[in-house]
Image (cartoon, rainbow, N blue to C red):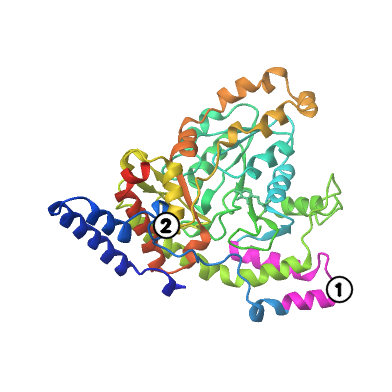
Amino acid sequence: MKDKKYSRREFIKQNSMAGFGAAAAMALPGANVLNYMTRQHDTPALLGGKPVVSPDWPDWPRWYPEKDEERLLEVMRSGVWSRSDVVAEFEQKWADTIGTKRSLALVNGTNALQTSLAQLDVGWGDEVIVSPYTFIASVSCILANGAIPVFVDTDPETFQMDPEKIEEKITPRTKAIEPVHIAGLPCDMERIMEISEKHDLVVVEDACQAWLAEINGQKVGTFGHAGCFSFQNSKNLPIGEGGAIVSDDEEFMDRCYSYHNYGNSYGSAEGRVGTKLRMAEYQAAIGLAQLKRLEEETTLRNENAGYLKSRLEEIPGISPYNLYPNVTRAAFHLFPFRYDQEEFKGLSRGKFLQALRAEGVPCSSGYGELNKQPFIENALQSPNFKKFYSEDQLDYEAFLERNACPRNERLCNEEAAWFTQNLFLGSKNDMDLIASAIEKIHKNAENLKG
Ligand SMILES: *Cc1c(COP(=O)(O)O)cnc(C)c1O
């Protein structure tokens, strides 16, 4: 992989040759020499130059037949495919890994969240405080339980729910806070738990991007009443589909189990309204294989992300994420940073990302404004919501006004950009290449604006 890419040394050599070319061109008649030199050595790939990186980043998900398939084949050959011992083993290992008494494996992260909220009696008539800078499932799980999401603006430095703006959103209807550790970077859970205790609210952590992330050495997902994880294909612990709830509260976990198994009685939990959300044995076998690598891969992501952050902080107009001071480890499902087009001669974020992709670095502009998506308006106007809420409560203009998140709006529409987790499973040299590609764009911003 490495030999197909330019080394950093080569890149610097080429850049300085381009610098020499510029100086030489000034002493020569015409700009031909300069054009020739820059085209060869420093022209942005988007304008026909040579990309900084060849596009062979680490693949995801990973599967090693020799190491990974034995258990899976055992399950397949046994004919026991529906929930049994392998799922129970995966749950025990996940609980041990996160540091909780119990874990319940189920079909996906969305249903982990929806089940947790339902079994903490969050439902019709309630409000749930949530971040607008997240994946749709963080919000659809609230609406699916008949509750109304209330959005707290984003802290642009950390990309997380701004803890200083939570209390002003609390009303007599507020039942829960759902902090989302977006990108796998922990929220300020100390502050959020203080607020929840003061106002007697339940806390369901959306840790669907935050496997093994820690605050003061304690794993996220263990601060609130429940923690929810996703094992979808793109996630750092990929099973294709899958999810888990973790908690120390045995009665709550019994209720979740009951709910996820048609509502049959389980342990201390009487029968209840339920559905079926069970994980299959072969999914758990895949999960056990992936879990073996998670610790090591998380360490590598932390090393590479920390190093890239230090490189990007040197580039004017690029502001990588900040972690809260008590964060001891992040999961880096994403590496978020802010882009300031003023520092790039007015080059738009869209054009910057296009140029970066052309240099061989996959990147994205990230989430849109979730608080303004049509699925919320449609839910509020649905016949069931009209049965449980007054016309005033469902007034969409009032909802938009109350849920305005101006800082998040700027983040989504102008500033944010991401790299995905698989890029951080490469080498330190890969990180240097990312930084070099951005430096190249910075240097050529005027040209790229065209
Ligand atoms: C992936 C994800 C979910 C949903 O998980 P699924 O397993 O896809 O249902 C929820 N919240 C966040 C923040 C996620 O990234």
On screen, residue 226 above or below 18: above
The amino acid at mark 1 is Gly
- Tell me where residue 50 appears, x and y as whole percent: 39, 61
How crowded is the residue under tag 2: few (<14 C-alpha within 10 Å), some, or many (20+)? many
User: As drawn, is 184 to the left or to the right of 158?
Assistant: right
Q: Nearer the viewer, residue 266 or 391?
A: 391
Q: Secondary structure at mark 1?
A: loop
**Most frequent secondary structure within the magenta stretch:** helix
* Relative to 208, residue 372 above or below: above
Q: Is residue 122 above or below residue 113?
A: above
Amino acid at dot 2? Glu
Q: Residue furthest bottom?
A: 66
**Residue 359 - label:** 2
Magenta residues (range): 71-98
**Snapshot quadrant of residue 302:** bottom left
158 relative to 81 in the view: left or right: left
- The picture places residue 77, in percent across and down from the top left corner, at 83, 78
The residue at which mark 1 appears reads as 79
- Where residue 386 sits, quadrant-wise, is top right
- Please name the residue shown 31% across and 49% down the image: 444
Task: Indicate which label's residue lies in the foreground, 1 or 2.
Answer: 2
- Respond yes or no on whether mark 2 lies under 8 Å from ligand 1: no
Does the magenta portion include 145?
Answer: no
Does residue 145 appear to the left or right of 418 in the view shown?
Answer: right
